[in-house]
């Protein structure tokens, strides 16, 4: 009898799963003693269902309140993957809408998104925005943003800095105009779309850098050389990886001196919350555990907005150059024991070379602190005087080579460097661990970019973190060497290849990677000669 109940539920779920994520509940038994409840989750487009479990992995075998079903299903990795893919698909639609109908510039688009999400935090505005005429809505939108930012208890000087970019775009000439397609106006349409598609996502996935994801999607459509702008946002799964490599906890104090949209701080906060037990510990993390610096005013507004959407860390986010003496002095007083950085990619500006940002970050950390940087691979293999300075003052614990197309479509090949601050390399006398992390399992797709299509990232991430923590030596994957500033800091220079596992496909892949590297760095012709 129980089998028939389950079969019937799964039969309907299979058909519904073509368009929805489906929770199927099969109930059988004539008495309470005979009662059997089987609960399944059939994610959209999945081949078959699986048992619905709690976040702890326990099967749901009882009738529970509907919100609990939603909570358990929402945190299933397959459901997360589908919902994130939906969100990114929506971001492309939103980009086209803002370009064609709002006529927003590239810098304005992410501000429209973040500002609207902040305004929707205001319960009165969220319920009444449809009541405003097109000419009145921009002022109401801006007023809701100001109210939410004011209630966040930002210092007055920071409040003015955050509000200014939103004040500017609230005066956009297209906002007060109704038209045939959007009689309520384009701003009303934008608010409606974000309220329907994005706000429910934010309310569930607190660790997801939504503003950063939208910003990254919008960058894909920006004309010109994105790399020349120095803007290369860290993918979400890498920000998560950094927090795990740094082993952050509720007592950590995390610094990101090039905060961008706040991705590293959000990932760190999510991991820190996992070790917090009481609400007071979580409040301490929000107020004291996250410190960020961002120089660009618009980007700072995005970061502050992003942090506000998570209810954390706004007062410790600074709009300034990381090299300003007053900022450096203030940050050092915070006693940060973890530093995470993705510096602006300098191109030919020697004074702003990526390694100088790394040096400054390490200078601001406490002795023995962990500093982790994601920077172009040429910083690891090309001579530079900053490399000698790094080893003179700090210990190079590890360097990991990352996938060639990690930042696609931006042509940057990156690596991760891990340092122990204020312990000279010559004093620690350590070998440096090199990891060849060339395959994160992500696949490049035509319309979705790089995605975890086969859902292998969690296993890959756990393997990377475990081998790093234990400094495991695996042929073809990792190696340990004593190095100086004159040596190459990358696994490829020292690893022995396990030729027994190489296939023709592997060879073709490496040739393509080599050619991509040469083309990116403009020295392909030199090799040909």
Image (spheres, grey):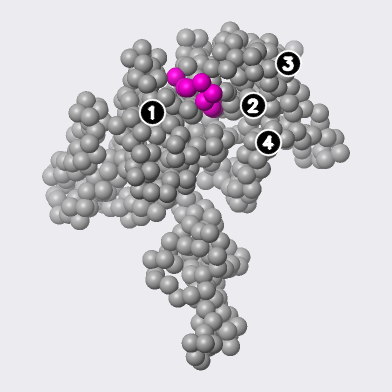
Quarter of the image where the C terminus is located: top right
The answer to whether residue 372 is magenta is yes
Which label lies toward us, 3 or 4?
4
Label of residue 470 in the image: 4
Q: Is residue 524 visible?
A: no
Task: Kindly report which numbered mark, 1 or 3, lies closer to the viewer in this rendering.
Answer: 1
Residue name at image x 20 percent, y 37 percent = 150
Q: Which mark is residue 527?
A: 3
Query: Dot 2: within a 10 Å radius of its alpha carbon, few (fewer than 14), some, or many (20 or more) residues?
Result: many
Specify the farthest residue to the bottom.
30
**Mark 1 or mark 4: whose residue is earlier in sequence:** 1
Residue that badge 2 annotates? 398
Q: Which residues are magenta?
A: 364-373
Q: How far across and how far down the image is residue 517, in percent?
A: 65, 24
Residue displayed at 68% across by 10% down? 486
Nearer-N-terminus badge (1/3)? 1
Q: Position of residue 69 (x, y in %)?
A: 44, 67
The image shows residue 404, relative to residue 194, as above or below, that is above
Q: CA distance from mark 2 to mark 4?
A: 12 Å
Front residue (pair 355, 297): 355
Residue occupying image coordinates x 43% and y 46%: 276
- Picture coordinates of residue 423, whole percent (x, y): 57, 17
């Amino acid at each position: 009898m129980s089998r028939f109940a389950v079969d019937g539920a799964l039969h309907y779920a299979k058909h519904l799963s073509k368009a929805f994520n489906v929770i199927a509940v099969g109930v059988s038994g004539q008495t309470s003693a005979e009662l059997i409840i089987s609960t399944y989750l059939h994610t959209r487009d999945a081949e078959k269902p699986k048992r619905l479990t709690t976040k702890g992995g326990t099967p749901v075998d009882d009738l529970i309140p509907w919100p609990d079903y939603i909570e358990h299903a929402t945190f299933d990795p397959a459901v997360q993957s589908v919902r994130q893919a939906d969100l990114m698909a929506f971001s492309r639609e939103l980009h086209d809408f803002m370009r064609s109908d709002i006529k927003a510039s590239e810098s304005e688009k992410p501000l429209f998104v973040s500002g609207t999400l902040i305004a929707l935090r205001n319960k009165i505005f969220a319920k009444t925005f449809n009541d405003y005429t097109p000419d009145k809505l921009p002022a109401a939108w801006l007023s809701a943003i100001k109210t939410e930012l004011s209630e966040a208890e930002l210092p007055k000087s920071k409040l003015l800095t955050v509000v200014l970019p939103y004040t500017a775009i609230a005066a956009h000439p297209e906002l007060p105009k109704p038209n045939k397609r959007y009689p309520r106006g384009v701003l009303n349409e934008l608010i409606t779309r974000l309220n329907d598609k994005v706000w429910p996502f934010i309310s569930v996935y607190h660790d997801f850098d939504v503003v950063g994801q939208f910003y990254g999607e919008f960058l894909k459509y920006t004309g010109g050389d994105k790399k020349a702008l120095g803007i290369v946002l860290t993918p979400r799964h890498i920000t998560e990886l950094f927090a795990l490599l740094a082993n952050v906890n509720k007592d950590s104090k995390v610094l990101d001196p090039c905060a961008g949209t706040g991705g590293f701080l959000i990932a760190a906060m999510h991991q820190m919350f996992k070790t917090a037990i009481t609400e007071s510990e979580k409040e301490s993390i929000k107020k004291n555990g996250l410190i960020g610096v961002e120089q660009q005013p618009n980007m700072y507004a995005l970061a502050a907005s992003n942090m506000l959407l998570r209810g954390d860390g706004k007062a410790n986010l600074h709009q300034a150059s990381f090299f300003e003496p007053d900022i450096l002095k203030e940050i050092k007083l915070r006693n940060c024991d973890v530093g995470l950085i993705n510096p602006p990619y300098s191109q030919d500006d020697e004074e702003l070379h990526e390694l100088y940002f790394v040096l400054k970050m390490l200078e601001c950390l406490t002795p023995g602190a962990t500093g982790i940087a994601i920077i172009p691979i040429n910083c690891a293999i090309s001579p530079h005087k900053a490399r000698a300075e790094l080893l003179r003052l700090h210990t190079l614990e590890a360097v990991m080579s990352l996938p060639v197309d990690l930042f696609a479509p931006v042509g940057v090949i990156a690596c991760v460097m891990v340092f122990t601050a204020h312990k000279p390399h010559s004093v620690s006398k350590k070998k440096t661990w090199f990891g060849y992390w060339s395959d994160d399992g992500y696949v490049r797709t035509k319309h979705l970019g790089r995605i975890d299509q086969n859902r292998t990232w969690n296993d890959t991430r756990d393997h990377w973190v475990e081998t790093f923590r234990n400094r495991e030596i695996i042929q073809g994957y990792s190696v340990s060497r004593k190095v100086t500033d004159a040596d190459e800091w990358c696994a490829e220079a020292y690893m022995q290849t396990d030729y027994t596992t190489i296939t023709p496909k592997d060879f073709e892949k490496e040739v393509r990677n080599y050619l991509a590297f040469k083309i990116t760095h403009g020295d392909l012709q030199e090799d040909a000669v």
